Every structure is written in C-alpha cells, then in structure tokens.
C-alpha cells in the first residue's frame, strides 16, 4: 500500500457483532437488490479500447442514499440506514470530525460469471466526476475480487490493489481511478460503497 494518504485500509473498525449483523442482513433473503443495467457507452468503456483485461460485468445494487447538487435527496433504505451509520460513526471518530456529508451510499453485490479470469476487471472509473469527494468501501464478506487502482486513463496500469476482507474499510480520495473485480472462487462479493463530500486532507 502506497503511504501517501491518498488511500489507506482500516481493519476491524466495527465490532464483531456489527460485522455479523451487516453480513447477515445483506445476504438475507429479505434484503432488496436491483439489477444494475449497465449502459456501456455512458459508463465509459469506450475510453479504454486497448485495455485487454477489461471485461465489465453486471451486478446487483441497492442505492441506499444519494443527494444531487441541488440538494435533492433519494433514500431507499429507511429500514437499513443504521448499517451506514455504523460505518459513518467510526469514520467520525477516526478523522476526529463532528460531521461528514454523505453524497451517495449503495450496496453492490457481484457474483461469479462464466469464463472469468484473475486478471479481468471492470471499468476503471471515478465515482462522482463533478464533485470533490472521498470514497469508503466497506467489505461485507470474505471473498476474492480485489479493488484495483490505476495510474491514469491513458496507460491504465494497475498501481495497487486491496483484497476484500470482512470488516475491512478502504478509504481513498475520489480522484483516483479504480475498478472492482468479480469473484472467481467466492459465490459473491458484497461491498458498501459510500461517497463523502470533501478531501481526505481537509
């Protein structure tokens, strides 16, 4: 892991009970996931015609919360918002802040797909292209399927990676190009993806 404060990993920031509660909820039969119908043009796959390992695949999502630039909010998780609070409260403690402004929170569930390979990855991207933000990825379960960091859109070289581990939180500045990998060995890879307003060094 590069030690430049652009991204870092926090393990076991929640209690074991909280980790289990989140995993049990998000793997339970009653949690509502929705099919993420990817539009390949709008998501930017055309930017990377020479990236041979780019094999973008679909996922199931649950958008828990989002707010646009006009202050309009969308919330689909009145019954599940407490799991976001678990993580946000620990971030407040870690950063020694009284408030963090959440811009978006969603759950991503990725499953195995046919002929997947260890070098394959999804589309490199930046979460919120119009806003200064930092990203928090909470890994819900133990699985394979790393989060990859890239140098830039032109070269798209992998410069670092973080492996999923239950209870692990990856935090990084939002201007870093990144992508996920679908699992090969694990039945599913589940993360909570949160975007907060601001910069890690603010």
Image: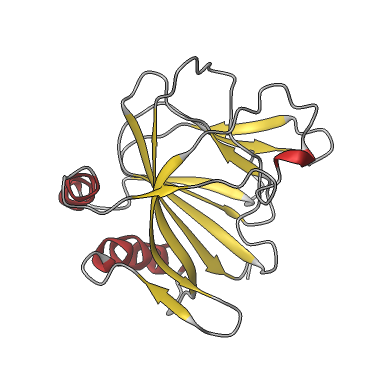
Give percent across and percent down for residue 39.
61, 47
Give 169 or 146, whichever is nearer the viewer: 146
Scheme by which the image is coloured: secondary structure
Give percent across and percent down for residue 112.
40, 25
Q: Is residue 168 above or below residue 96?
A: above
Q: Is residue 120 left or right of residue 50?
A: left
Quadrant in which residue 62 is drawn: bottom left
Quadrant in which residue 185 is drawn: top left
Q: Is residue 66 above or below residue 159?
A: below
The answer to whether residue 33 is visible is yes
Give percent across and percent down for residue 97.
46, 75
Q: Is residue 199 above or below residue 11?
A: below
Give 79 or 17, whichever is nearer the viewer: 79
Q: Quadrant of the N terminus?
A: top right
Give percent across and percent down for residue 25.
19, 50
Q: Is residue 111 above or below residue 178?
A: above
Give 49 or 21, whichever is nearer the viewer: 49
Q: Looking at the image, which residue sits at the far right? A: 154
Q: Quadrant of the C terminus?
A: bottom right
Q: Is residue 80 left or right of residue 3?
A: left
**Residue at 64% across / 51% down in the picture?**
6
**Residue at 68% across / 45% down in the picture?**
177
**Residue at 32% across / 52% down in the picture?**
13
């Amino acid at each position: 892991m590069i030690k430049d404060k652009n991204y870092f990993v926090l393990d076991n920031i929640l209690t074991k009970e909280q980790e289990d509660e989140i995993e049990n909820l998000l793997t339970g039969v009653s949690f509502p996931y929705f099919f993420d119908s990817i539009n390949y043009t709008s998501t930017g796959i055309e930017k990377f015609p020479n990236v041979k390992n780019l094999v973008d695949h679909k996922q199931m999502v649950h958008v828990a919360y989002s707010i646009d630039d006009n202050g309009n909010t969308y919330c689909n998780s009145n019954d599940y918002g407490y799991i976001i609070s678990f993580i946000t409260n620990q971030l407040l403690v870690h950063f020694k802040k009284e408030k963090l402004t959440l811009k978006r929170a969603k759950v991503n569930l990725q499953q195995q797909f046919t002929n997947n390979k260890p070098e394959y990855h999804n589309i490199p991207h930046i979460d919120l292209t119009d806003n200064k933000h930092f990203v928090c990825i909470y890994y819900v379960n133990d699985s394979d399927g790393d989060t990859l960091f890239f140098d830039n859109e032109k070269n798209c070289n992998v410069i670092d990676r973080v492996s999923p581990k239950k209870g692990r939180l990856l935090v990084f500045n939002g201007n870093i190009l990144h992508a996920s990998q679908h699992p090969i060995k694990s039945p599913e890879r589940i993360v909570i993806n949160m975007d907060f307003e601001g910069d890690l060094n603010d």
